[in-house]
């Protein structure tokens, strides 16, 4: 069996503008560490072919330190042949890292938007030489939507005992193109094109979520059935709550069946422990007489448990950063804190609580002749604002103020 690893969309040195400066630095360090962990896995597990399906880094933000780090990591696995198909963030140009850096001899970069191929001979698990024909193309600009690199491609039947692999950063579409969004920035490949070319495995990049390995059938020039496996690796590690769920790479083995046809066996490989998860919970199902801070926290913990049992959420653990958005109604003088909810949940790496609840008893506050009522009226315009940010800030101010009144 020939061992290969397929990854994509690592985005080293991504700017992470949605984070504050300290958190952005932490996230970028996590990305670099994940890349190093992957290369260590390659070294320790006899991976002979590494397929990087684009967006290894972001052109505009790549530092000299990260560029040197990439070169060192690639040189550290001389027994692994590395194939890179530049994407829309690390697209190939004459002055890019791929063209100007002194990359080690085991690194092969596709440099043209037209399909190219490399043929290498590597050892399988039994140290038997195996020939692999690796096809791919390069994004040569940040936007190449509509371009079909495989349109009209005709490749001879592959030699017996050879694996034919494709690696590319592209949007996958049906032959009609109906499932490729018009706004997509990437080139387009179709399942029919992949199968017609006779690829055994197609390593794709661009979408940050993997939906598993699928397959499509075609017939060879001699009429024999032939199977092409294809799939997205997803991003190597989530960069925040916009990329929730388990992330990683695809580790696979290529072998031959009794008829000499290639057979691909994949499994999902989790490179880093940290992951991000998001869940929205409504409090409308709670009994009114049970609405206390501890009761709400216990209710939210049950919502998380139910989501896990329903398959909506992967069970949170110490490596999980969970964003919990709470909706529904909550008494105006009840302030839900992250500490209370975190205490009711299983251990987490972190909890981000987003309170989108609506105060449930504002009519009583409107008629309250005390300072409580005056405080409510001072906030009433902001509380009725259609600006979500202003409304949420006013609700928080109301809850915090009423907390102070409770302790007077």
Image (cartoon, rainbow, N blue to C red):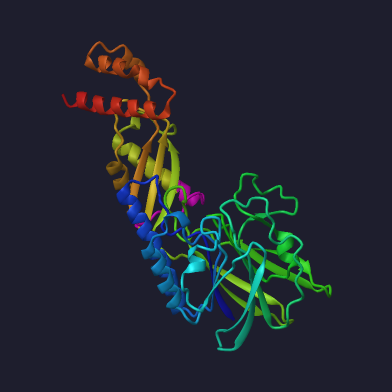
Between residues 87 and 340, which one lies in front from this camera angle? Answer: 87
| Quadrant where the image shows the C terminus | top left
| Quadrant where the image shows the N terminus | bottom right
Residue 269 is left or right of residue 227, and the answer is left
Indicate whether residue 310 is drawn in magenta: yes
Residue at the extreme right: 222
Residue 219 is left or right of residue 138, and the answer is right
Q: Which residues are magenta?
A: 306-318
Residue at the extreme left: 408
Residue 278 is left or right of residue 266, and the answer is left
Determine whether 293 is above or below 16 in the image.
above
Q: Position of residue 274 (x, y in %)?
A: 39, 58
Indicate whether residue 349 is drawn in magenta: no
Residue 69 is left or right of residue 139, and the answer is left
Q: Position of residue 44 (x, y in %)?
A: 43, 79
Q: Position of residue 390 (x, y in %)?
A: 37, 26
Determine whether 355 is above or below 195 in the image.
above
Q: Say which residue appears at 45% left-offset and 40% top-offset.
A: 280
Between residues 408 and 9, which one lies in front from this camera angle? Answer: 9
Can residue 271 be seen here? The reply is yes
In terms of secondary structure, what is the magenta stretch mainly?
A: loop
């Amino acid at each position: 069996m020939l061992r290969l690893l397929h990854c994509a969309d690592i985005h080293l040195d991504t700017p992470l503008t949605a984070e504050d400066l300290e958190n952005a630095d932490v996230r970028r360090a996590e990305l670099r560490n994940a890349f190093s962990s992957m290369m260590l896995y390659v070294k320790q597990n006899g991976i002979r072919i590494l397929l990087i399906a684009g967006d290894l880094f972001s052109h505009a933000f790549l530092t000299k330190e990260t560029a040197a780090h990439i070169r060192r990591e690639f040189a550290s696995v001389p027994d692994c042949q590395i194939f890179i198909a530049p994407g829309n963030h690390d697209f190939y140009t004459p002055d890019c890292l791929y063209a100007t850096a002194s990359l080690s001899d085991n690194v092969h970069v596709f440099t043209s938007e037209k399909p190219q191929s490399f043929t290498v001979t590597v050892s399988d698990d039994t140290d038997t030489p195996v020939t692999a024909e690796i096809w791919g193309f390069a994004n040569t600009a940040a936007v190449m939507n509509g371009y079909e690199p495989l349109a009209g491609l005709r490749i001879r039947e592959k030699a017996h005992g050879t694996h034919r692999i494709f690696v590319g950063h592209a949007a996958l579409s049906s032959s009609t193109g109906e499932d490729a969004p018009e706004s997509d920035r990437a080139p387009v490949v179709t399942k029919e094109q992949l199968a017609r070319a006779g690829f055994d495995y197609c390593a794709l990049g661009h979408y940050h979520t993997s939906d598993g390995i699928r397959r499509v059938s075609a017939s060879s020039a001699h009429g024999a059935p032939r199977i092409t496996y294809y799939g997205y690796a997803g991003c190597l590690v989530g960069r925040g709550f916009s990329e929730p769920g388990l992330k990683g790479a695809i580790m696979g083995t290529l072998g031959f069946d009794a008829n000499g046809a290639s057979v691909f066996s994949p499994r999902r490989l989790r490179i880093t422990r940290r992951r991000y998860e998001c869940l929205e919970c409504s409090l409308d199902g709670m009994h009114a007489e049970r609405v206390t801070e501890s009761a709400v926290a216990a209710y939210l913990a049950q919502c998380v448990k139910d989501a896990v049992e329903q398959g909506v959420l992967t069970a949170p653990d110490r490596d999980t950063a969970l964003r919990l958005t709470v909706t529904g109604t909550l008494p105006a003088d009840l302030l839900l804190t992250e500490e209370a909810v975190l205490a009711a949940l299983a251990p987490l790496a972190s909890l981000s609580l987003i309170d989108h609840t609506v105060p449930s008893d504002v009519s009583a506050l409107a008629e309250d002749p005390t300072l409580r009522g005056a405080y409510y009226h001072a906030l009433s315009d902001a509380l009725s604002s259609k600006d979500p940010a202003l409304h949420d800030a006013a609700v928080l101010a109301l809850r915090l103020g009423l907390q102070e009144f409770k302790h007077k």
